[in-house]
Amino acid sequence: MGRNGKKTALWIEAAAFVLAEAVLFSVIVFGLFSGHAYPETRYASIVLCLAESVVLACVFRRRPDIFLVLAMVFTCIADYFLVIRDADYELAVGVFSAAQLFHAARLFAREPARLRFSVLLRLALTGISFLVCAQIGVRMVLIYLALFYIINLLCNLLESFLQGAPAAGFGFVLFLFCDITVGLNGMGGSWGLPYSLIRTAAALTWIFYLPSQVLIVLAFLKGAGRRDGHPARNPGQDRQQKNRRTDTRATGAEPQAGGGRTPGLV
């Protein structure tokens, strides 16, 4: 199968993945209106996202994609506690934080210096938020873990748009909306919010969450045929470039500097 054939097969596989997720999403939405949680269906939809990330990593063979696989592994672990067991929330939020760090590693895979700076910035923001919470008397471990998690999520959201990866950025936006509904559902009663608002937030959680994971997984699908974020080699083009360099040296002309850095992972 030629390169175009492989590319077409990949897009067909991705379309099948989206179709399968759409079917699962329909079941989840039906459950919201019929009063059934369908936890196994919800969890299966996230495991399917993990499977798709593995497929993309095997096809592309790019360094950043292994971080996506690891992020989805930790996402599945966290969702096991939240969706299947409905327990150990502190552990789940901590594991979700690790997933966000792997998403960050994917975004900065070819820029380790920027990754180190981003991690230091996240830790500094987390430290400041912890100090503020300590000053106002917050003692809940879950709150501190949630702060570390949300700071990493917001940083990944902003960085996705800055790197020219809007699909990933919108995925993280939906992820943020999902977390807002989780917060309203979990803390709405103590905040004195109307019960109808709390119920609505609970219903919207998975309507935001599953599309966010699908978008994040497929965000860099347009890199088909590339490895490690660089275009695939074409022997004919290589020969043409080599001939042009030879002609340039023969005429004594100086080659011009190349353009800017390759954006993002694509």
Image (cartoon, helix red, strand yellow):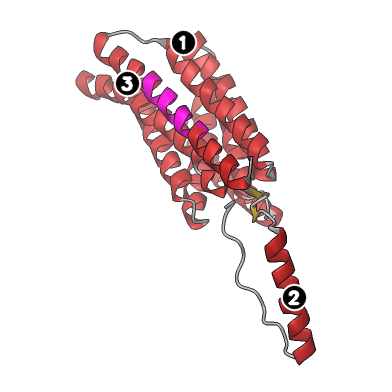
Residue at figure coordinates x 58%, y 25% from the top left:
51
Q: Which mark is residue 243?
A: 2
Q: Is residue 140 visible?
A: no
Q: Is residue 16 magenta?
A: yes
Q: Is residue 107 visible?
A: yes
Q: Which mark is residue 193?
A: none
Q: Which residues are magenta?
A: 13-23
Name which residue type carries label 2: Asn
Q: Earlier in the sequence, mark 1 or mark 2?
A: 1
Q: Earlier in the sequence, mark 2 or mark 3?
A: 3
Q: Give the side of residue 76 with respect to residue 199, left or right.
A: right
Q: What residue would you read off at disc 3?
A: 202
Q: Is disc 1 in contact with disc 2, using a CB cutoff of under 8 Å?
A: no
Q: Where is residue 163 shown, x and y percent of the image?
A: 53, 56
Question: Nearer the viewer's eye, disc 1 or disc 2?
Answer: 2
Secondary structure predominantly adopted by residues drawn in magenta: helix
Residue at figure coordinates x 57%, y 46% from the top left:
4
Task: Compare residues 127 and 261 and report the one nearer the observer.
Answer: 261
Name which residue type carries label 3: Ala
Residue at figure coordinates x 72%, y 65% from the top left:
238
Q: Is residue 59 magenta?
A: no
Q: Which mark is residue 40?
A: 1
Residues at marks 1 and 3, CA–CA distance in whole angstroms? 17 Å
